Amino acid sequence: QRLVHDLHHWSQTPDADMPHDVQANAQHMAQLARDVSLNSVHQVADTLAMQLARLRTQRVVADIHASVQGAQEVSRLLQQFAVGNVRAPQENVLAALRGD
């Protein structure tokens, strides 16, 4: 949830610097998801971390909004897992993170 909050706050002021820990938090989330074989969460979190790395050098407001969607998708997938459902990530979110 902190990742969602930080990215949402940044999307409101895209001229500000990227919050310091968001890329590391996404990478950590991807690693944890891979360690426990949550492939859908790993896929979204890893793609989000790569997109955040790109945003450090080339900031585009639409990409910041895609980052928020990516963090929300990770949260949604984790909530689904918590109640016993393993879901695939939404393809439109992955596409937006990849810049497709």
Image: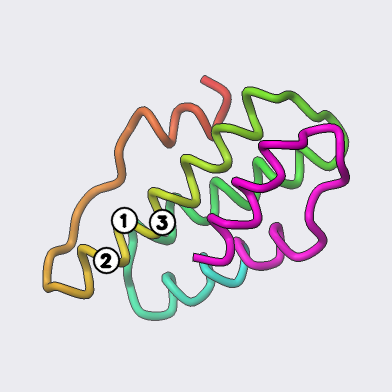
SS class, disc 1: helix
The quarter holding residue 61 reads top right
The quarter holding residue 93 reads top left
The residue carrying pointer 2 sits among few (fewer than 14), some (14 to 19) or many (20 or more) residues within 10 Å by Cα, namely: few
> Where does residue 5 sit, x and y in percent of width and height?
58, 57
Residue found 34% across the figure and 61% down from its top: 39
Q: Which badge, 3 or 2, is on the more N-terminal residue? A: 3
Marks 1 and 2: CB-CB under 8 Å? yes
Q: In the rendered structure, which segment of residues is drawn in magenta?
A: 1-26
Marks 3 and 2: CB-CB under 8 Å? no
The residue carrying pointer 3 sits among few (fewer than 14), some (14 to 19) or many (20 or more) residues within 10 Å by Cα, namely: many
For the residue pair 32 and 74, the one nearer the viewer reads as: 74
Marks 3 and 1: CB-CB under 8 Å? yes
From the viewer's perspective, tell me whether residue 99 is left or right of residue 34.
right
Residue carrying label 1: 76
Point out which mark residue 79 bears: 2
> Where does residue 98 sit, x and y in percent of width and height?
55, 31
Name the residue type under label 3.
Val
Q: Is residue 8 magenta?
A: yes
The quarter holding residue 24 reads bottom right
Residue carrying label 3: 74
Numbered label tally: 3
Name the residue type under label 2.
Gln
From the viewer's perspective, tell me whether residue 73 is left or right of residue 46.
left
